[in-house]
Amino acid sequence: MAETAALRRRGLAGRAAGTGDVAMLFVFPRAERPCFWMKNTLLPLSLAFIDARGVIRQLEALVPNDERRICARQPIRWALEVSADGPAAEQLAVGRHVHGLPKPVVTRPWPPPR
C-alpha cells in the first residue's frame, strides 16, 4: 500500500518481471487527478482509478518502461495497480464497486490553527 508521497512515487518500479501476481494500492489524502508512468517498471500492469465512493471510474493498460503519463480523467481517492496477466486484473471493470478500501490519511498542518 502506498500511503505516502514517497511510496506513491516509487510504486512498483524495479520489481523483477515474472514475480507472479502483484498489486499496489495508492491512497491519496484528498481527491485529485494523479498521473502514473512506467519508467523502470518491468511488469505489464492494469490500473484502476477509484473515486471517493469506491467505484472504478477508469481502467488503463500500462506497458513496461513506458514513460508516457496516464492521468485520471476525474478526481479519485485510490488507484489500484495489478499484474495485467494476473487473476485480479480480470475482476476490474468500470462501474464496479471496490469494498474494503482504507480511509485516506489526511495530514493536518503543525502547529494546529488557533
Image: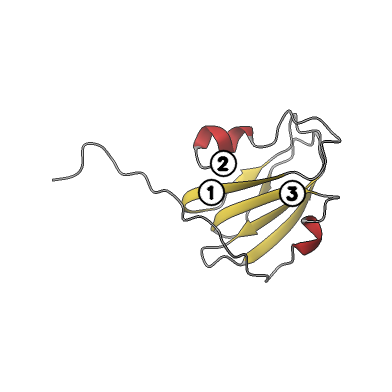
Residue 84 placed where, x, y %?
82, 49
- For label 3, count other residues whose C-alpha is less than 10 Å away and answer few (under 14), some (14-19) or many (20+): many
Q: Which mark is residue 2?
A: 2
Amino acid residing under circle 3: Val
Q: How many marks?
A: 3
Residue 1 placed where, x, y %?
58, 43
Point out the tag, 1 or 3, that comes first from the N-terminus.
1
Element marked by disc 1:
strand
Residue 10 placed where, x, y %?
62, 32
- For label 1, count other residues whose C-alpha is less than 10 Å away and answer few (under 14), some (14-19) or many (20+): many
Q: CA distance from mark 2 to mark 1?
A: 6 Å
Q: Which mark is residue 82?
A: 3
Residue 96 in the image: above or below residue 90: below
**Residue shown at 68% from the left, 56% from the top:** 48
Residue 78 in the image: above or below residue 67: below
Asked whether disc 2 touches disc 1, contact meaning CB atoms under 8 Å apart, the reply is yes
User: What residue sits right under mark 1 in the picture?
Assistant: 27
Element marked by disc 3:
strand
Point out the tag, 2 or 1, that comes first from the N-terminus.
2
Amino acid residing under circle 2: Ala
